[in-house]
Image (cartoon, rainbow, N blue to C red):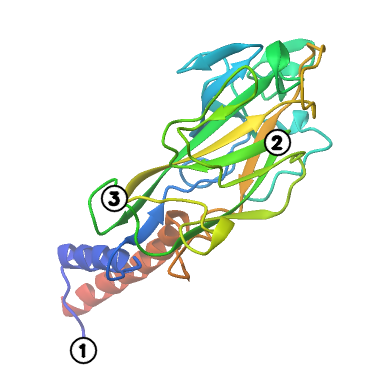
Amino acid sequence: MNLNITPKAFLALAVLFLGGVRLVYGGGATTVYGLYYTGVDDSYTLLSGGTDSHWSTSFARVGGSTYTGSSTYTGASYVVSSTYIDGGWVPNSSTSRWITAPGASTAGTGGTLNLGGDQLSGNGDQGTNSGFFVYKLAFTISGAGGNGSNVTNNVAISLTIAADDQYSVYVNPASAPTVDNAGVISTGGTAASGSRTSAWNNTNSLALQNFGSGAANNAKFQIGTNYLYIVVANTNSQTGTNGSTALNPSGLLVYQIGATATINGTPVPEVGTLLPVFAAIGAFGWRRFRRDSKSAA
């Protein structure tokens, strides 16, 4: 039996299918989307250079000065060119690229700014030679309840972070992270979800989740827009002040994110994995519709 389906009806069925992929529970979160690796575009395609539109550098303290807004050291993050990847860094993954703050140069003596170099200020965590860069990613959780309401079911996001030199992670802090001249991070009392020193070759994953006991329950998620902040300290491995004013490598790599987000233990497919499946089904259905229409004629 041939089904005489109009184009409008087919489109409605396709939209219904796409909506039906969502994970629906009795309350709380139903979908998580907008989780991007570093160094990819909207289609999750690797960037070879230029800026990353998803990860911004929202705050920096360099040489005792604070930078916010769109200025040197703040704004859209830059993708580090393969030419300037530091030899001690974990390599780029097949799905992500290292990024760095705007204002990075191509040489430790200055070089050219924002052409894929990884050289930034920071030779200690205190005083005029400290360097701190706060990277931010906005992502969305949809579900029951109004925007800003706490997620009531179990959400977990697994990610791996490599950073030069060290990092601290915050999820929806009470206030956007800032750093004072003594290297103290201020987040309105919100504790870090995780941190690591000497992290440029880190390959261990970190789970951000709103359930579990003790340190495992390390994140608070909300319906609507959520913010992930990663504070990267470019300290040249110095725990105090350092008299050197030379630039040195600094950057951030975030990978293994998105595909390992779960709601109540069930993996949440990212938009990037849903669209190819939807496109394939759509192409098959449209060919079937055209064939059935011709048969009916």
Horizontal arrangement in the rendering, residue 288 relative to residue 90 (left or right):
left
Q: Residue furthest bottom?
A: 1
Looking at this view, is 295 or 107 the one in front? 107
Amino acid bearing label 2 = Gln
Q: Give how far across and how far down residue 88 sits, in percent.
A: 83, 37
Separation of disc 1 and disc 3 at Cα?
A: 49 Å
Q: Quadrant of the N terminus?
A: bottom left
Q: Residues within 10 Å of mark 3 (few under 14, many from 20)?
A: some
Q: Earlier in the sequence, mark 2 or mark 1?
A: 1
The numbered mark at residue 1 is: 1
Q: Kindly state the secondary structure of the residue where label 3 is placed.
A: loop
Measure how far apart labels 2 and 3 are at the Cα level.
32 Å
Say which residue label 2 marks. 166
Q: Residue at x 65, y 20 (%)?
A: 182
Q: Residue 286 sits in which quadrant?
A: bottom left
Vertical placement of residue 225 versus 128, above or below: below
Can you tell which of label 2 and label 1 is closer to the viewer? 2
* Disc 1 to disc 3: CB gap under 8 Å: no
Q: Percent position (x, y) of residue 117?
A: 71, 23
- SS for callout 1: loop
13 vs 207: above or below: below
The residue wearing badge 3 is 149
Residue 111: % across, % down = 74, 12
Amino acid type shown at disc 3: Ser
Q: Quadrant of the C terminus?
A: bottom left
Compared across the picture, whether 255 is left or right of 4 comes to: right
Q: Is residue 51 visible?
A: no
Q: Is residue 238 left or right of residue 266?
A: right
Specify which label sits upstream in the sequence, 1 or 3. Answer: 1
Q: Secondary structure at mark 2?
A: strand
